Amino acid sequence: MASEKLPSREQAIQFLRQAGCSEKVVRHCLAVAELALEIAKACKERGLNVDLELVEIGALLHDIGRSKTHTVHHAIVGAEIAESLGLPEPLISIIKTHVGGGITSKEAKKLGWPKDIYFPRTLEEKIVSYADKLIEGSHRVPIERTIENFSKELPPPAVMRVRKLHEEMSALIGDCKCLK
């Protein structure tokens, strides 16, 4: 049964470790959470309605599935882990929609994933997905570097979705120092 209550920051970090995430993955999640919170605060300053706590906890748990796999399937595995922990639906949704700039239903079918929506739709989902694209390991990187790396591995439409997410987020937060 899913809870409505978000875990605390400490509980989220404990969930990562209990699930079996390496310290490298934990450090990555901490870095994504820090940047995601900065982006969320920039959105709030611009008058956007954003749940800072959901962004922070979602960013901390976005890669919980990496405790079992480092493939694209970590999003689905992570959502399953979150469900088994009884975490709130908005949190589960962040975990399953953070990969790339979203996964189309056609791509999801090819991957053997359950029929669902794997595109970040809420502001909180978009912020976590975007922040994840700006962190390599536990270091911030320019979006151009991520796009260049994705271009080597992914088909052009997938790379385009990352670019589109970047454009959308840049338009929302403007010249935020968090993107420097």
Image (spheres, helix red, strand yellow):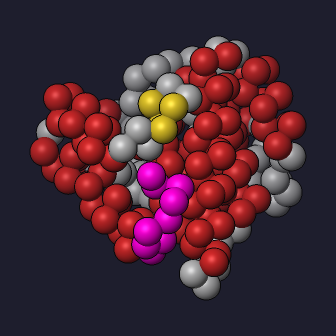
Write down the quadrant of residue 79 in the picture: top right
Write down the quadrant of residue 9 in the picture: top right
Say which residue appears at 61% left-offset and 64% top-offset. Answer: 40
Does residue 61 show up?
no
Q: Is residue 161 left or right of residue 114?
A: left
Q: Relative to residue 130, is residue 39 depicted above or below? A: below
Q: Relative to residue 118, is residue 65 depicted above or below? A: above
Considering depth in this image, is 153 or 40 the residue closer to the camera?
40
Q: Relative to residue 175, is residue 112 depicted above or below? A: above
Q: Is residue 18 left or right of residue 150?
A: right
Considering depth in this image, is 44 or 61 the residue closer to the camera?
44
Say which residue appears at 33% left-offset and 46% top-offset. Answer: 143
The percent position of residue 150, horizontal first and vertical second, equals 25, 35
Say which residue appears at 43% left-offset and 68% top-offset. Answer: 175
Say which residue appears at 65% left-offset and 46% top-offset. Answer: 34
- The range drawn in magenta is 172-180
Write down the quadrant of residue 17 in the picture: top right
The percent position of residue 97, horizontal first and vertical second, equals 47, 50
Q: Is residue 173 left or right of residue 53?
A: left
